[in-house]
Image (cartoon, rainbow, N blue to C red):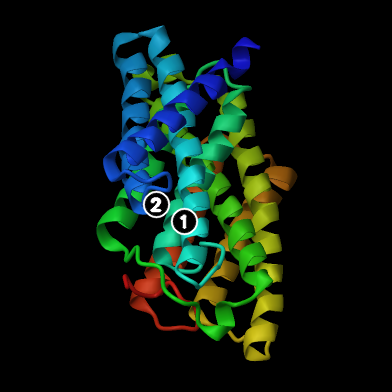
Amino acid sequence: MKKFSCLVLGLIVAFFIYFLGIVTQKNFLPDNTFLFSMVTFVYLISSIFYLLYAVFNWEKAVFIGSVVGWGGFLGNILGILIRWIQTHQTGFGYVPLSNLYESLVFFSACIAGIYLFWEFNLEKKFVGFLVFVLSFLILAFANLKADPSIKPLIPALKSNWLIAHVTTCFLGYGAFAIAFAVSILNLLSEKNLFFQKFLPEKEFLDNFTYKSILFGFFWLTVGIITGAIWADQAWGSYWSWDPKETWSLITWLIYATTIHLRLTRGWSGKKLSWLSVLGFLSVLFTYFGVNFLLSGLHSYGNLS
């Protein structure tokens, strides 16, 4: 029961975020963007507590960081649900996964949520520091740069395959982000005793990275398949070598190679970590680089 106390207390934090929205806006359905702004700072506060644990060896800081992290994650999910309701209030009525802003807030929730559920099995939890920094940065970018307005969907996006495709892809991206965070800390700990002190053993980190990659690889594969089905319905072709499709395939091949080398040659340590970093850089380019630097059929290609 003690293991789940962070989740229970996190519910209280999430309720406080919601209550603050009600009081501030005098509405039982506060604007979703207000909630996401609050969650952004909650993620930052969570990461700070994980860092305080490492700097001052303050054991309770990890517990507080986890509680605050759960509050941020649950607040993030609540914001998505409220935005869903508010899309119906505007008359458009769609699952909020259709534009850059909505995909970013869902991305941050995936990173935080997947990590928090895996954290139940972690004894040393300093990994949470970098995980919540990533969630904070992604949500901060959404709040500062992406257009949060609710707009009607274009015909191609009015499909249930959109929900399946985006959900599965971002579950994969979230897992890859966690593998990236673990890999960065693993690489830093190679020559720094400070990080070694607060991280699990090397073998555990390797297995954690590998399992995160496996989890992400499965969902990315499902995401590519559902995307192909959706593309056939929307544009009459399963695969058109759109830049996003091409880079998704490149990302898939990088992680497939990583899994292959792990299974056949037992790659671990630095080799596995560097491949994980390379894979996540490919994820970021697939998501951000392709959208802003290359033109294509996908809808996240501009800040508006």
Quarter of the figure with the N terminus: top right
Q: Is residue 62 above or below residue 114?
A: above
Q: Is residue 238 visible?
A: no
Quarter of the figure with the C terminus: bottom left
Q: Mark 1 is on which residue type?
A: Arg
Q: Nearer the viewer, residue 143 or 126?
A: 143
Image x and y of residue 290, in percent:
42, 73
Q: Is residue 195 above or below residue 100?
A: above
Splitting the image into 4 quarters, where does residue 60 fall?
top left
Mark 1 / mark 2, whichever is N-terminal: 2
* Left or right: 50 as drawn, with respect to 298: left
Image x and y of residue 209, in percent:
58, 37
Splitting the image into 4 quarters, where does residue 288 fall?
bottom left
Q: Is residue 2 visible?
A: yes
Task: Write down the residue under mark 2.
Answer: 32
Q: Secondary structure at mark 2?
A: helix
Q: Residues within 10 Å of mark 1 (few under 14, many from 20)?
A: many
Q: Secondary structure at mark 1?
A: helix
Residue under the point 61% across and 31% down: 117
Q: Is residue 211 above or below residue 302?
A: above
Task: Write down the residue under mark 1.
Answer: 83
Residue under the point 46% across and 83% down: 296
Residues at marks 1 and 2 touching, judged by CB atoms closer than 8 Å = yes
Splitting the image into 4 quarters, where does residue 121 fall?
top right
Q: Residues within 10 Å of mark 2 (few under 14, many from 20)?
A: many
Image x and y of residue 180, in percent:
48, 43
Q: Is residue 77 above or below residue 150?
A: above
Residue under the point 41% across and 8% down: 59
Q: Nearer the viewer, residue 14 or 64?
A: 14
Residue under the point 61% across and 62% down: 252
